[in-house]
Amino acid sequence: MVRSASPPLRRLLLPPLFEQFVQSQSSLVCRSHKRKMSAMAQPIPGKFVPLESSQHTEESSSDGFKFRLVSYNILAQVYVKSAYFPHSPSSCLKWKARSQAVLTELRNFGADILCIQELDEYESFYKKNMETLGYSSAYIQRTGEKRDGCGIFYKPSSAELILKEEIHYNDLVNSVDITEKGNNSTAETCTVLAEKKMTLLSPIVVANTHIYWDPDWIDVKLAQAKYLLSRLLQFRGHVSSEFSCIPPVIVAGDFNSTPGDEVYNYIVSSGEAPIKLYSLYAANGGEPPFTNCTPDFTGTLDYIFLSDGGRLKPLSLLDIPGPDSTDVIGGLPNHQHPSDHLPIGADFKVLRTA
């Protein structure tokens, strides 16, 4: 199911948190709608597949630091209704089961940075549980009555949050003609952070976004993408002035756009966009066949875009199941995948500047 999400505009500095805890593993039992399952249903651990070019990167430069980033629309519980997902076992849609399954997935990724969309129950569940796993976080809730938003979780042992900016797509209300298309409170928000490895003092800009969902509102989606990249350009300029360098940029999220449509083409077009970006998966074997999988819609909506500067080298990609994989047949969510979206991610190496 394709949906939406949004949050407010502030600029602030956040200190890093250094507390780290170890979480005891919780077990999870799902029952299918036909029979009680004797075994515990567990999410399938993601597999990171090394890229052929990564061996050359490793051999040619040992100077730099590595980190893992995963982007994931976890499906906000507020949108989980059996009417929306009649194909899913009802037990896997319940909050108690889903929350533990999502938490298990997030832990199993072993990521240094997590870009999460459709994040609800942040204060009541995710913030504290992710702190237990060693993560600090920055979260923006959507405006209006919406209860979900975007969040970036990061491990202070790997990176320090030095700057944060929030970009609110509702700023576009007067510049995009949406008066006849309903309430614009569904417009999205993007979180932008600059992360640095403390020992290298080398900043990285990480952006997490969730573009508006409706395929009929192409003008709104495109306006959001343009606004995002223009604000990113400004933010990168500020970071460049602050640290006397041009930082690599990573833009991850649910773009609610398929490969080749207007939003996708704008982001990867070197002539139009203010920041030159390329798609991580497209440049390394092609976009996944899908990242969103339900009987009503199956297609690729989620991406990780990278700036084309040469210092940020992908080493491996999170493998995406194919259409014939037994764990996705029938549509998501299910016992193995607690969201209707699949996570995407990669291991990276940032080369030290000369």
Image (cartoon, helix red, strand yellow):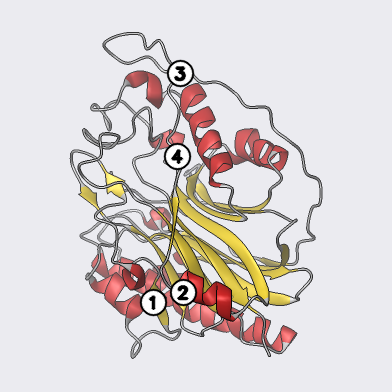
- Residue identifier under label 3: 40
When the figure is inspected, residue 22 is found, relative to residue 237, above or below; the finding is above
Q: CA distance from mark 4 to mark 2?
A: 26 Å
- Label disc, if present, on residue 64 of the rendered structure: none
Three-letter code for the amino acid on which mark 4 is drawn: Ala
Could you tell me which secondary element the residue under label 4 belongs to?
A: loop
Q: Earlier in the sequence, mark 2 or mark 3?
A: 3
Please state if 73 lies on the left or on the right of 83 as rendered. right
Three-letter code for the amino acid on which mark 1 is drawn: Tyr
Please state if 86 lies on the left or on the right of 97 as rendered. left
The residue drawn where x is 79% and y is 71% is 199
Q: Nearer the viewer, mark 3 or mark 1?
A: 3
Contact? badges 1 and 2 (CB < 8 Å): yes
- Label disc, if present, on residue 306 of the rendered structure: 2
Q: Nearer the viewer, mark 3 or mark 4?
A: 3
Please state if 278 lies on the left or on the right of 351 as rendered. left
Three-letter code for the amino acid on which mark 3 is drawn: Met
The x and y percentages for residue 84 are 27, 33
- Residue identifier under label 4: 76
When the figure is inspected, residue 62 is found, relative to residue 243, above or below; the finding is above
* Residue 124 placement: quadrant: top right
- Residue identifier under label 1: 278
Q: Earlier in the sequence, mark 1 or mark 2?
A: 1
